[in-house]
Amino acid sequence: MSAQNRPARKIAVEEAFSIPAHMDELKRAADAYTGTEDGDLLLAKRQTGGGEMTKSLLDLDGRRLELMDEAGIDLALLLITAPGVQAFSSQDGVRIARQVNDTMAELVSRHPTRFAALAAVAPQAAAEAAKEIERAMTTLGMKGVVINSHTNGEYLSEEKYWPLLEAAEAHDAPIYIHPRSPIPDMAKAYLPDNLSHAIYGFQAETGLHGLRLITGGIFDRFPKLQIVLGHAGEGLPFWLDRIDYMYAKPRGRRVLKHRPSDYFMNNFSVTTSGMNWHAQIRYLIEKLGSDHVMFAADYPYQIMLEEVAQLDSAPIGDADRENIYCRTAERVFKL
Ligand code: MN
């Protein structure tokens, strides 16, 4: 990429952080856990142990800003690291989500050109989550919501979560469905060879969640709702044609107004977090169009410089690179 066709801005949209109140509660839950199946709490034992990852997650505008400068990332869209507040009780989840959002609003007000943020909410308290979405989008100036896939083994297609979807639609808040480990009913299958996390389990869990929203008729009920999926759309873009083909057969599935892929094209956009490989980027552009694709570095789980270098060197047109680096995110998240 030559100097003259550098994109207007480089925006990274899936950048994780924590705050002490969240880290402490997650550490308490992880330390108390003696089982072998909860992939999130097992991972949290490492992430909350006080090492480099703990420090990187808690650093908001120190080293993080230096790394962004080194990588040429202008703006980071921050989200609470997985599993957010979804492993906590309703009461703790609601309380800590508010603290997270207040801290983020303050950080963004100090660095308005470098940071924007997605709101943390506790889906296990759906009515409170709906209120927090309203507060985050109106008073706090946030750009959407992050939900870390399942909540107590359930997906957002369940009716009890609809108040939250209704609030997101009403306040124009895209919901970033970020991965966490597979639901408890599936957890055992991922334990051999430690497959619960980013190597495969995250994607299988979160792709299924996205599909369940479509097949659950959520977008017939909430037609303006916008969902963002990371990791190249958690595999779904590769499956859309087969899903349409199979959905057309009478197999006892719900009657939808449109084909599954139509909802994906109208109600979803995807990011390149952890998937900035050239073949994957080119496929996303061909299948979805670059106006549905956004760059993410997935810091601190991936290395900013490496992710930027991959997209910079991708054999794609400058207009597509501009869309992926900034134009799509500017539209989807109003940045
Ligand atoms: Mn991530």
Image: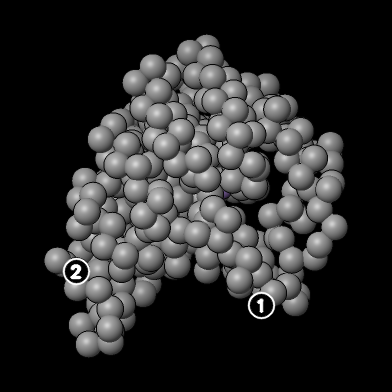
Q: Establish if 47 lies above or below 63.
A: below
**From this viewpoint, which residue is outermost toward the bottom?**
250
Is residue 214 visible in this depiction of the protein? yes
Q: Is residue 59 above or below residue 186?
A: above
Percent of width and height locating residue 298 = 56, 46
Foreground pick, 17 / 288:
17
* Residue behind mark 1: 189
Rounded to the nearest angstrom, the CA distance separating label 1 from label 2 is 31 Å
Residue in the foreground of this view, choosing between 324 and 134: 134
Question: SS of the residue at dot 2?
Answer: loop
Circle on res. 279:
none
**Quadrant for the C terminus in the image:** top left
Residue at 42 percent of width and 37 percent of height: 127
Q: How is the image coloured?
A: one colour
Image location of residue 188, percent across then percent down: 69, 74
Q: Amino acid at mark 2?
A: Leu
Tell whether label 2 touches label 1 (CB within 8 Å): no
**Can residue 7 be spotted in the picture?**
no
Q: Which residue is mark 2?
A: 256
Q: Residue at (73%, 36%) from the top-left corner?
A: 25
Q: Is disc 2 surrounded by few (<14), some (14 to 19) or many (20+) residues within 10 Å?
A: some
Cβ of mark 1 under 8 A from ligand 1 = no
Q: Could you say where residue 332 lies in the image, as x and y percent from the top left?
A: 30, 39
Dividing the picture into quadrants, the one containing residue 238 is: bottom left
Q: Amino acid at mark 1?
A: Ala
On screen, residue 94 above or below 99 = below
Tell whether 300 sits left or right of 222. right
